[in-house]
Image (cartoon, rainbow, N blue to C red):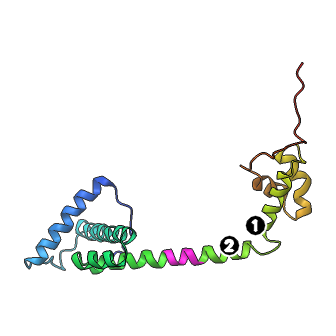
Amino acid sequence: MVKANRQKLLDSELDHLEFWANWRKAGRSIGITPSPKRVDEFSQYMENAIANFEAESLFIAFEKADMEGWTRYVQAHPPSPEALAVLMLVAVGEANKARSRKSANKGHAKDGASISKRKEIQEIWASGKSKSRAHCAEKHSESIGMSVETGKKALRNTPDPDPWPAKPYKQKT
């Protein structure tokens, strides 16, 4: 069995897959089942694609509906076991991502860790005592405990200080 993953489908693929999903559903309702001996590459691909289509439909319904609406949708459109398997893979993957992101942020946010150092150098830059971001990083990053390169990265896309007394003004000649 090929492992199916939920994929974002293109609009051009949706109509084609919806046709095959409806055809398969209609065939099963009148008693036509695919032969287990005849599992060629295309039919395996279509089974995975249909499961992805059904999982995508369930996911969209879940995002847009409240619990009662979701219950009505699932009762009206019972999902196939393949679609539920794809949805479970997605749910486990999302839960693992959220858990690892939370633990990484927890470690980075401790006192003296990277997030607090980043905020500290950004506050020094916001004071307006440096001529440029690079000058600020070179002058203050080592005292904070970060490399100059990391200090420069921390100051990228930060707003200019207001007021900025250390800004060098060009003389008009």
Residue 17 lies in what quarter of the image? bottom left
Q: Nearer the viewer, residue 102 or 149?
A: 102
Q: Quadrant of the N terminus?
A: bottom left
Q: Main secondary structure of the magenta part?
A: helix
Looking at the rendered image, the quarter that the C terminus falls into is: top right
Q: Is residue 101 visible?
A: yes
Q: Secondary structure at mark 1?
A: helix
User: To which residue does mark 2 refer?
Assistant: 105
Rounded to the nearest angstrom, the CA distance separating label 2 from label 1 is 9 Å
Q: Which mark is residue 135?
A: none
Crowdedness of circle 1 by 10 Å Cα count: few (<14), some, many (20+)?
A: some
The answer to whether residue 13 is magenta is no
Residue 168: horizontal and vertical position, in percent? Answer: 89, 36
Residue at point 24%, 78% (across, down): 78
Residue 129 position, x and y percent, is 90, 48
For label 1, the residue is 115
